[in-house]
Image: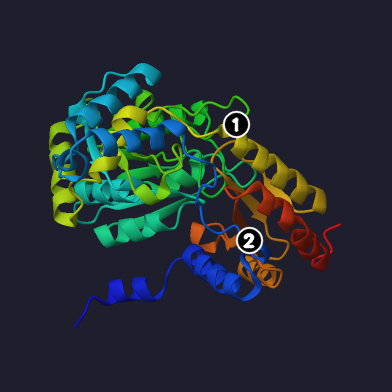
Amino acid sequence: MINNTMKNYGNNRSVIRDLFEFGNQRKAIVGADNVFDFSLGNPNVAAPKEVNETIMELLQTKNDIYVHGYTSAQGDAACRQAIAEDLNRRFGTSFRKENLYITCGAAASLKITMTALYAPEDEVVVFTPYFPEYRVFAETSGYTVREAACDPDTLQIDFNTLTQALNEHTKAVIVNSPNNPSGVVYTEESIAALGKLLEEKSDEYGHPVYLITDEPYRELVYDGITVPFVTKHYRDTVVCYSYSKSLALPGERIGYILVPDEIADSTDIYAAVCGAGRALGYVCAPSMMQHVIEKCTGLVSDINEYREKRDLLYNALTGMGFSCVHPDGAFYLFVKSPVDDAKAFSEKAKEYDLLIVPADSFGTPGYVRIAYCVATDMIQRSLPAFEKLAEHYHLK
């Protein structure tokens, strides 16, 4: 016998990956320039020049064992120290290298953290819309997942639905801001109110309700918007981070888990994080990238490029009659389907070689996600296809 749960995950890929593979097949048939693939959050904007310069310097001046050899299981000490100092400088915190565990990106950070915190009968709460893999990570760690719908007009936290989702079995709440798929940034007032509510519920239940923050888009915000640093608003916060978006390095799989000293049972939680990383086979993230992060943490790719792409696509689609959530961060446009069945809308879009992701698996039926972190030229070339799609649904 084999693990049927894993077989099902393998046979039923995420809708995002399915569209991405469909796009590759279509490109082979009609040509890459004629397929408009908005499926995957795969940054087109270049990494800061310092990243490649650091890689070249490492390869030219360091010996192979330093560049390619194992680091400590929890990550290279100098890398962790550099990250702690960068966070302290930017957010007025007092983290140490001992608070950090280096991971293979945010996915590993989330899976390790959920595994580390889990006890039988635990539940985790996610805000809709949410990244679909949260459910995969949580359920394969043993959790029951409860959804709390955000406000339908603003997609900010709805504290009524959140309160209904919380109970004595709640181990953690996951926050993702800027949000994938909506691009919404939760306000400081919302984060402060969330912290206050979870403090009250922790006292009521007699155990901490942890806040797990998934922050790969933390630096990708526009128009002067500020992203609250959650540990400043709630003590029992574990931060999961990836450099995939801020440094445009998605394929390099490098990130971290931050376990602050202030968190309840911090020493035990950090030990459990180390143990979960060991049990899952995630020890020693890519060593060369750890050395790169030591030199480049705190840098960000060109935000203006993302903002220009956002404005181009948002203005064009709303001008065609599509209803879109205005994104303050990340690089996704959340678009209301003109028909109730967003999957049918996505299938119709494929007839024009437009690959857009139906949001049913994000917990918000009736919407699609468009990843605009693509070449500006592709966005421009896609607009006639979007125009035909709008005409099909008589949006004007």
Task: Tell me where residue 55 appears, x and y as whole percent.
Answer: 33, 38
Would you identify the image quadrant in which residue 231 lies?
Answer: top left
In what element is the residue under mark 1?
A: loop
Mark 1 touching mark 2, by CB under 8 A? no
Q: Is residue 162 visible?
A: yes
Q: In the image, 374: left or right of 199? A: right
What colour-coding does the image apply? rainbow
Q: Residues within 10 Å of mark 1 (few under 14, many from 20)?
A: some
Q: Nearer the viewer, residue 344 or 244?
A: 244
Q: Could you say which disc has been placed on residue 32 in the image?
A: none
In what element is the residue under mark 2?
A: loop
Q: In the image, 130: left or right of 70? A: right
Task: Tell me where residue 70 appears, x and y as whole percent.
Answer: 15, 44
Q: Please give the name of the residue rendered at 56% of the width and 42% of the height, measured from the top-left corner.
A: 183
Q: Please give the name of the residue rendered at 34% of the width and 48% of the height, measured from the top-left corner.
A: 253
Disc on the earlier residue, 1 or 2: 1
Disc 2 marks which residue?
Answer: 366
Q: Could you say which disc has been placed on residue 222 in the image?
A: 1
Q: Please give the name of the residue rendered at 60% of the width and 24% of the height, measured from the top-left corner.
A: 224
Query: Farthest residue in the bottom direction?
Result: 1
Amino acid at dot 1: Tyr
Quadrant including the C terminus:
bottom right
Q: Residues within 10 Å of mark 2 (few under 14, many from 20)?
A: some
Vertical placement of residue 35 versus 126, above or below: below
Vertical placement of residue 221 versus 322, above or below: above
Task: Tell me where residue 182 appears, x and y as whole percent.
Answer: 57, 47
Q: In the image, 316: left or right of 188? A: right
Q: Is residue 168 visible?
A: no
Quadrant including the N terminus:
bottom left
Q: Please give the name of the residue rendered at 75% of the width and 59% of the height, measured from the top-left corner.
A: 386
